[in-house]
Image (tube, rainbow, N blue to C red):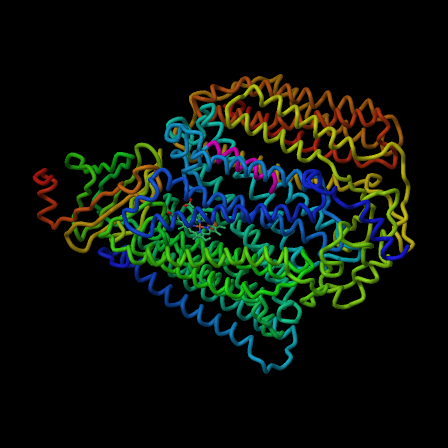
Amino acid sequence: MNALQRHRKLDAIWASDKGFRGWFNTVSHTDLGRMFLVTAFFYFGVAGVLSMLIRAQLATPHSAWASEEVYAQLFTMHGTIMMFLFAIPAIEGMAVYLIPKMLGTRDLAYPRLTAYGYWCYAFGGAMMLASLVLGLAPDGGWFMYPPLTGGIHSPGINTDFWLIGITFVEISAICAAVELCVSILKFRAPGMSLDKMPIFGWYILVTSLMILTGFPPLILGSILLELERAFGLPFFQAELGGDSLLWQHLFWLFGHPEVYIIFLPAAGILSTLIPVMARTTLLGYGWIVASVVALAFLSFGLWVHHMFTTGIPHMGVAFFSAASTLVAVPTAVQLFAWIGTMWKGRPELHMPMLHILGFFITFVIGGLTGVMVAIVPFDWQVHDTAFITAHLHYVLFGGFVFPILAGLYYWLPLVTGRKRFFKLGETAFVLIFTGFHGTFLAMHVLGLLGQRRRIHTYDVDAGWTAINLTASVFSFIMAIGLALVLIDIIIHLFIAVRGARSPWGAGTLEWATMSPPPSYNFASLPHVTSRAPYTDNPTLPDEMARGLGYLSDPQEGRRETLMIDVTSGTPEAVVVYPANTFLPIKMAAVTGVFFLSLLLKVYWITPLAVIGVAALAWRWAWQLGARNDAGPQPVGRDMYLPLSSETAKSQGWWGSAFLLVANATFFGSLLFGYAFLWTIAPGWPPPVWLDLWLPELAFGIAAALAAPILIRMTCARVAGGQAAAAPCTMALVAVVVLAVCLASLMLRTPDPSMHAYGATLLVLGGYGFFHAAVTGVMLGFLRARIAKGHTSQARRAEPAIVRLWVDYTAAVGILCLTIAHLPALLT
Amino acid sequence: MLDPAGPAAREIATLWWIMLGGSFAILVFVTILLALSFRPDRRQHDDVRMERTWIVGLGLGFSVAVLAALLSYGVATGARLTAPSETPVQVTAKATLAGWTFGYDARDDTEDVLHIPARRDVEVAITTGDIIHSFWVPRLAGKIDAIPGHVNRLRIEADTPGVYQGRSAEYSGPGYLDLRFTVQAHDADGWQEFLRGETE
Ligand code: HEM
Ligand SMILES: [Cu+2]
């Protein structure tokens, strides 16, 4: 087989369907990454237009542009769209597109999940957009503080759009995060040990872990608030044992890490680009990895700095103030590592470099004002003024928009295989840079003069007119600059000339294939021995195209790649991917029906939608696997490896493990909420505690202890080649008993609409019950697989996955039952 | 806020000017470092030594030193501003969507005007009748939230008798813009008169 024949053969296996069909059934990370990015930038445009309307309204005093109600929708939706529909998805898009190419593999760990995540984002985003078009958009500010957003003060559907729509969109973030974690740890090119991984991989790994631990508190908060609004469970109502501060804790437990979730990938872009632009290598790779990890840890200890004015005791405030300033240290380490890198090399003023310089100036100012507001007394003054708005834009625009524009100009030649020839980008940069600083420097001053944020107008005699007008004029200059970038990119996509491969002389693998990249990324997988494999071996692209690497000879029309050992990068198994399918979009649509039924309060549809999702999920999993042992497969270079389904830990096991991390964070947040209400909220103890009912407690715990033992027996029997049906059935029975006990707990809770205690208990029981139900379905699935001969001594991966879920559910069940009975046991 | 009329606001304004100066110096410093990276003549450096200067020296050493200094100043200021004083004048403030109600030990409540004696420490106990609001008189002190089911305390003091503008500073839906109040600081005689109910 020569290179061209190999290309034809691989492309026939990997290509997405032509035309319209291909848009909806593609599972390729290249397609989906681009779709994420295009959709995200569409929302950037939408939110940008909203911000222009805001600035138009504020340009003059007593402007009659927007009424108070409309203005509230404008700023709420501007903030919400920018954060949830632009920034996070843009990051996902970048990572989905780049990670497999940079790490030298052919796709992400779960191609269908990438597609499912995208469609959840697309449908959830459409829901939010519809609210805007209908004039029913959320209007409580992007952090949605109750009681303002509770049922009493905001009875309309506006708030429900936010709570339900954003939760829907967040599914995509969780999917992407699970998938990126597993891909980065297990799906790199052979030989790429962790210390040889491109620095971008580290950033995305840490970011993904932060999404898994940062988003669950918000999802929990949204569920609780929606339960309060829809069914009157008083989690946030002080009169009934709730506390509105709980929302603030849950929101900022998410909201602060969110800022770093947005910043870190952008920093990853900078760490990748700056050495290339300066023709050198990154200074302090190890230091940077360490500081990124430190940043991730620290950022979870800072959330209270958004609540300095809520009356938290001075010592607590001092602690969080210290932590908030401390977080500047790892950021400073990175900043100086980048400048040091520029000193080490010879920076060239290409287009991406302009935006990098824009980043430096803007972000340093944003960081400095950030340290200022971390100093508590100062925050008491500027909190909730235009100074904060200005600060957050310096951080978000400086720390995110400039880097992502730099990244866009850097990777566009890869995506399109073309090079720019008009110099529109330079003009655009100047407009954006001056426009940005003109707008937001002015807004700092307004804040210091006492202009509150979120006010829709102001008096002439406040003396703010000239400054506001200046800010508005400059914001339009910035808008023109951003529009020019768009035009520049469109021209680039359609009429620019073909460019050379690897125009910047970078050393990472994404450049070591054709541009635009082929559907299969690499004709054969390279063996990596350094951090810059392409620089060290300029003939690498040819060698890979000629099939000198791994998996150069696709077997039986399969989409294949390699799974490796986490740290050393030694190849371990062959992964066979599913091909193009409509399953993800169907499942996202049914998930959408679920959320829509909640939004429109047609609750009889909800259970049907749940069953629909479960049925599709069953099919999703059923399509994988085989009924015969395949044995070791030739992967090239005289190596034979098993299929991943014939190992002890397949990709499904890894994915489940990371999903359970997110899940455990959710559960932890719930327990935190319970403890918080108990100790801090007014109106406790509740009028009645749950009665002790021993059979429920005893049978529940016994079943929860039995299930893990039984699933272990199942696994052992499968591995030993014995009949495994019986223990599997018994494990199923145990989980059903557990579910019944948890359901009984839910039915016995003291009236949940009368006190937050009953409401919390109901949610606790519901969480346990839901997990017992899911695990029950999984055991049923496993039982069916055993019956159909899908498991064998070799094909032992599936029982191991179910075991993880059984263990988790058992632990959750025991905790739920014990915690619920504890007050009765103690008294 | 930049025109303080009380000790708390004054301390915070001083804090701001110091931080502004420091920040400006750091910004200039970083900009110079960036500009210098583009200079053409340069000898080759070795990574180990560069890591020591840039990362250990500037990234860790410099930032830790600056932040530690600022933090201790900030915490000390915060402690001073919240330290209990011997005999503060006690007043209460209750926010609602309809406006603010202020209560005093010795006389009837007032609506939308808070009366205080000038040059005395006043402790305002703040709560709300409905949703979250925030009590803020920029020229006198920082702000603190009014939260359902909780009572927060803020200390204010005015240097001279006069009228100071106050406002709610936590978004509360339609009508937020107009949720304002005034603070009337009396001299000693005026305060006694007010307490006797002779002023409205
Ligand atoms: C394109 C240029 C932008 C302009 C001109 C702009 C302008 C504004 C203005 C004037 C406000 C204040 C509204 C008010 O308090 O009354 C605001 C709020 C906000 N902006 Fe932007 N913005 C821009 C880009 C961004 C970006 C890129 C992000 C995030 C990635 C962002 C996130 C936010 C958030 C979170 C809020 C707070 C919303 C709230 O108070 O609920 N903005 N923006
Ligand atoms: Cu924060």
Position of residue A594 in the picture relative to residue A785 (left or right): left
Residue at x-position 33% and y-position 56%: A469
Q: For residue A127: magenta?
A: no
| Looking at the image, residue A481 lies above or below residue B181 | below
Q: Measuring from the top left, give residue A735's x and y in whole percent.
A: 69, 23
Of all residues shown, which one is farthest toward the front? A495
Position of residue A714 in the picture relative to residue A291 (left or right): right
Image quadrant of residue B112?
Answer: top left
Instruction: Using the image as rendered, state which of residue B61 and residue A124 is in the foreground.
Output: A124
Q: Measuring from the top left, give residue B93's x and y in whole percent.
A: 25, 39
Q: Is residue A608 visible?
A: yes
Residue at x-position 44% and y-position 62%: A365
Secondary structure mostly seen in magenta is helix
The quadrant of the picture occupied by the N terminus of chain A is: bottom right
Range shown magenta? A160-173
Q: Measuring from the top left, give residue B107's x and y in whole percent.
A: 14, 36
